[in-house]
Amino acid sequence: MAKFMDVHDGFVGVTREQLEEAHRRDLENEGAEGVHFERAWLDPESGRVFCLSTGPSREAVARVHDKSGHPTTQIYELPVEIG
Amino acid sequence: MAKFMDVHDGFVGVTREQLEEAHRRDLENEGAEGVHFERAWLDPESGRVFCLSTGPSREAVARVHDKSGHPTTQIYELPVEIG
């Protein structure tokens, strides 16, 4: 299992409720891929979202987000974590 | 207090020990600005680092990183956090 950070753009003005709904869809779809989305953070001013996950591969993380309707190609594998 | 994610580029091939040293400098410098760096993640392949912090402002976070010798302009305020 590896850890990943992925980044989404275009979420300008999105509310907490809308992010929770998007995250809920990820949690529904993640099991089939062996992925788990741990946390998500939103900057509604820049429209940027960061998602922290664990999973078997970058491609698996991408497939969950694809199924949930918010695809991204910005997925970073994180072999080093501090704190 | 607000939460922030900041992003650094150019850390290709950096080791855990080198990231720990950079993080240690942030911890030395953060107190004067009322900032705390909670976690940091490194993708040594793309050279991207993500730092999660709390603090009074984006500018305060930037000043800590400046003092530590790894400045960045990519600092996102995160009023919404899930998970």
Image (tube, coloured by chain):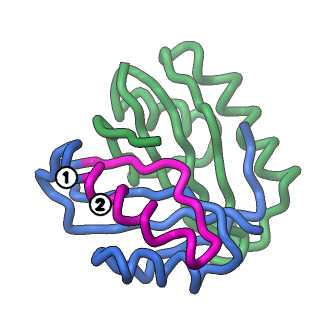
Chain colours: A green, B blue
| Circles 1 and 2: CB atoms closer than 8 Å | yes
Q: Is residue B22 above or below residue A5?
A: below
Which quarter of the image is occupied by the N terminus of chain A? top left
How packed is label 2: few (under 14 Cα within 10 Å), some, or many (20 or more)? some
Q: Is residue B19 above or below residue B30?
A: above
Residue B24 image offset from top left, x and y in percent = 35, 56
Q: Say which residue appears at 70% left-offset and 72% top-offset.
A: A12
Marking on residue B18:
1
The span picked out in magenta is B19-43
Say which of B36 and A55 sits in front: B36
Residue B40: in magenta span: yes
Q: Say which residue appears at 59% left-offset and 15% top-offset.
A: A31
Left of A45 or right of it: where is B36? Answer: left
The total of numbered circles placed on residues is 2
- Amino acid type shown at disc 2: Ala
Left of A43 or right of it: where is B72? Answer: left
**Outermost residue, right side:** A17
Q: Is residue B71 above or below residue A44?
A: below
Q: CA distance from mark 1 to mark 2?
A: 6 Å
Subunit ID for the residue under disc 2:
B
Residue A41 image offset from top left, x and y in percent = 66, 53
How packed is label 1: few (under 14 Cα within 10 Å), some, or many (20 or more)? few
Subunit ID for the residue under disc 1:
B
Say which of A70 and B60 sits in front: B60
Say which of B67 and B47 sits in front: B67
The residue that label 2 is drawn on is B22
Marking on residue A54:
none
- Amino acid type shown at disc 1: Gln
Residue B52: in magenta span: no
Q: Say which residue appears at 84% left-offset and 61% top-offset.
A: A15
For numbered disc 2, what is the local secondary structure?
helix
